[in-house]
Image: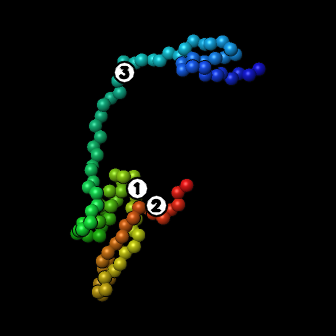
Amino acid sequence: MDDSILIDEVGEQEEYGSVLEPYTTCSSSVQPPEFEVEVEIVKPPCLGMCFETLEAAKQFYIDYGKSFGFSPVIRSSEKSYSRSDEVSSVQMTCSRFGVYRD
């Protein structure tokens, strides 16, 4: 004996050749609560942006990445030629940069 149920039309089921009662939808007077979500808008990066510190630049890109659903990482960095060994430039990219996607 086959216990399968076939969908004949929207809202109806057919079982062994006989049509069952159409589905009914439930209505409710309960309303979902309304709430406000605070979203911090991070301005997009642009050419020529300057930051006071390397940490400030990293934090900017971390915040920017979060707002668009990705996490940035340092791709490369260069140190200055002076004896202080300070970082003079940094390239940041998406953490999925160079990863093959199906």
Residue depicted at x 30% and y 77%: 88
Tell me the number on the disc at residue 11: none
Question: Residue 70's mark?
Answer: 1
Disc 1, SS: loop
Q: Is residue 56 visible?
A: no
Do the numbered discs 1 and 2 sit on residues whose CB atoms are within 8 Å? Answer: yes
Mark 1 and mark 3 in contact (Cβ < 8 Å)?
Answer: no
> Mark 3 or mark 2, which is nearer the start of the sequence?
3
Residue 62 image offset from top left, x and y in percent:
34, 59
**Helix or strand or loop: what does disc 3 sit on?**
loop
The CA span between labels 1 and 2 is 8 Å
**Residue 77 vs residue 4: left or right?**
left
Which residue is the site of mark 2?
96
**Kind of residue at disc 3:** Val
Disc 3 packing (10 Å; few <14; some 14–19; many ≥20): few
For residue 73, side relative to residue 88 (left or right) = right
Left or right side of 30 for 36? left
Near-viewer residue (95 or 21): 21
Q: Residue 45 lies in what quarter of the image?
A: bottom left
Q: Looking at the rendering, which quadrant does residue 80 occupy?
A: bottom left
Q: Earlier in the sequence, mark 1 or mark 2?
A: 1
Which residue position holds label 3? 30
- For mark 2, does the 10 Å Cα neighbourhood hold few (<14), some (14 to 19), or many (20 or more) residues? few
Give residue 100's position: percent from left, percent from top.
53, 60
Nearer to us: label 2 or label 3: 2
Residue placed at 39% from the left, 68% from the top?
A: 74
Q: Residue, x 40% and y 18% (percent of image)?
A: 28
Report, in whole angstroms, how far the alpha carbon at label 2 lies from the one at label 3: 44 Å
Which amino acid type corresponds to the residue marked 2 in the rendered image?
A: Arg
Name the quarter where the C terminus is drawn: bottom right
**Label 3 or label 1, whichever comes before in sequence order:** 3
Q: Nearer the viewer, mark 3 or mark 1?
A: 1
